[in-house]
Each structure stands twice: as C-alpha cells, then as structure tokens.
Image (cartoon, helix red, strand yellow):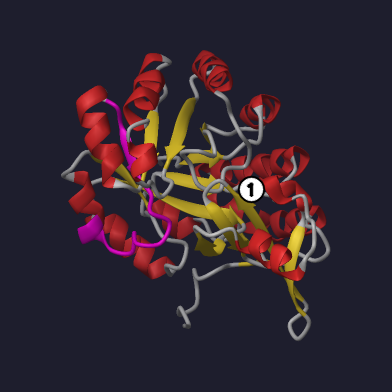
Amino acid sequence: MKKPELLVTPKDLNALERLFNAGADAAIIGEERYGLRLAGEFTRNDIKQAVELAHKQNKKIYVAMNALFHNDKVEELAEYVAFLNEVEIDAIIFGDPAVVMTVREVSPKMPLHWNTETTATNWFTANYWGKRGATRAVLARELSMDAIIEIKEHAEVAVEVQVHGMTCMFQSKRTLIGNYMEFQGKNLEVERRGKERQLYLFDPEREARYPIFEDENGTHIMSPNDIAIIDELEEMIDAQIDSFKIDGVLKSTEYMEEVTKLYRDAIDLCTTNREQYEEKKEWYIDQLEELQPKHRKLDTGFFFKETVY
C-alpha cells in the first residue's frame, strides 16, 4: 500500500535534522518575506544547507512563496526563483499567479505546489492550476473528510492535507496589534511583534486562547486548538492522499520531534498492519495529549463536522 509523504515545518536547521531523523520525508521552509506563517526563518545560506542535508538522506525541501505579493515585491521574485533553482530545491509553494509566471520564465521545470490556504475547496480549481503548472494542491483546512476523499478521486494533481497542528483563522495585511498599542499609547517595541511574544486573544466564555502575531505579511490569528487526526488515517491512506502535513508554527522543536515520531509510526502501521494500527489508536492519542500544553486541546478540526459561519 502506498505511504503518504510525512511533511513537516521546522524552525531552523537543527530542527530540520531532528525531524528528518524522527521520520519526516519532506519539509517546508523559506523566508518570511515570501512565505506565509513559517515555523522559522531560513536565510538563503540556510536553504542551501537544508537542501544538502535533505538530499543526502533522500528527503525533500519545499520553499514557501505563498505570501500575498504587492507590486514592490514582484520584481524580486525572478532573482529568488533563480536562486532556488540553483540550489535545487524540490518544489516551490505558491498562491499568487505572479509566482507561476515568474517560474515559467526563470525555471520552467520547477515543480509547483498550489497553496492559497483557503480556496482549495474543489477538484475543478485544483485541476485548473494543474493545467497551469501545479503538481500538487494543498487543500483548505475547512474541508470534511468526505470532501477531501471526493477531491482526491477527481484531482489530476497530488493532494496534500494537514493532519496535525494549529490553523489560521484570520489574516490581515495591516499591523493590527501595533496599531492598537499605539492607539492606546503603549510601547510594545513592536518592530517585530513576532511569534516569540506569545500574545493571545482570550475568550473567557469558552476559555479559549487564540495565538496572535505579526510579521512582514501582516497580522495572524490562529486557532485555539490543534488538529489531530492520528487515529483517523485509514480513509485518507486508502484514498491515496499524497502528503500528510504536521504544521509546526508556534511549536517547539521538542514537541515537533515527538509528534513526528508518533505520526511516522502510525502511518507505517496503518499501511502495513491495519489491525495493529486500530489497536494502537488510543495510545497515539494519549501520547499526543501528554505533549499538549494545558491550554491547547486536540480536536479533529472540520474533518467530521460541517463548516459554520
């Protein structure tokens, strides 16, 4: 039975090596200037070293260029794509057609993964981008299991699904935190209102904490819970979903390392010994629960419920 790729998002080179050793097959990295909600910042030298490390182990490196680009950045894209081609990354992740057009001119053989975060909700759109150069569609996080399976049945491109981690609930290109603090007359030293600040929006009624941070791409509000589908992999594996992603944004390397090991074991068992996988499901969940911070619960996202607006 075909095993899906196990895809992770490391925060630095040390994390990349540890996650590969834990069983990951591929990693998403990049620079904040070009990629959305990355777990960590990778300079060009870091990217070059990451590719060398990955290819020695027969692993893959994908670089995110899925930010929302304005005119001032479009002229930079060709030079960046040329660099990525030179160091031989395995694919570029894009959402903006400007990236597709640039890749066609600079590196026409470069594989492209279509990821707009929210609009990959049907196979027609996935195949539309497939006909324009994409080799993979990264599905929206708000899809049900049935919708994911149906898309895979009709998709002419590979399909990637997030199986673990937090999701983005809101993004604005504006620096909302900094603007608010300045309005309040407070000095937050907010030139980099980054992930390390551990800022939250708190909902006392639900006792929910929504992580919030700013970066070069604006303001991001994240989900209060983490997706965990480690005990519900059968349908997607049987449908031959191509890639399972563990999102590492706002997560420690230690956390990501242990979670990657668990999913590596679960994927291997589910593809080789289904009965043993079924018996081990509760153990997987128990192990994940022990790793979770007290204020972050695990749930199944939208996999088994209708989207409510």
Task: Decide: is 36 above or below 89.
Answer: below
* Residue 121 placement: quadrant: bottom left
Query: Could you tell me residue 66's position as x and y percent?
Result: 41, 45
As rendered, which of 264 and 50 lies closer to the eye?
A: 50
Residue type at the position of mark 1: Val
Mark 1, secondary structure of its residue = loop
Principal secondary structure, stretch drawn in magenta = loop
Residue furthest out toward the bottom: 205
Question: Which residue occupies 56% across, 48% down?
Answer: 37
Residue 78 in sight in this render? yes
Q: Is residue 89 left or right of residue 155?
A: right
As rendered, which of 232 and 174 lies closer to the eye?
A: 174
The N terminus appears in which quarter of the rendering? Answer: top left
Question: Which residue occupies 61% across, 63% down?
Answer: 176
What's the magenta region? 110-125
Query: Could you tell me residue 134's position as x and y percent?
Result: 26, 41
Question: Which residue is denoted by mark 1 in the rendering?
Answer: 249
* Residue 116 placement: quadrant: bottom left
Task: Decide: is 27 above or below 119.
Answer: above
Q: How many marks?
A: 1
Residue 228 in sight in this render? no
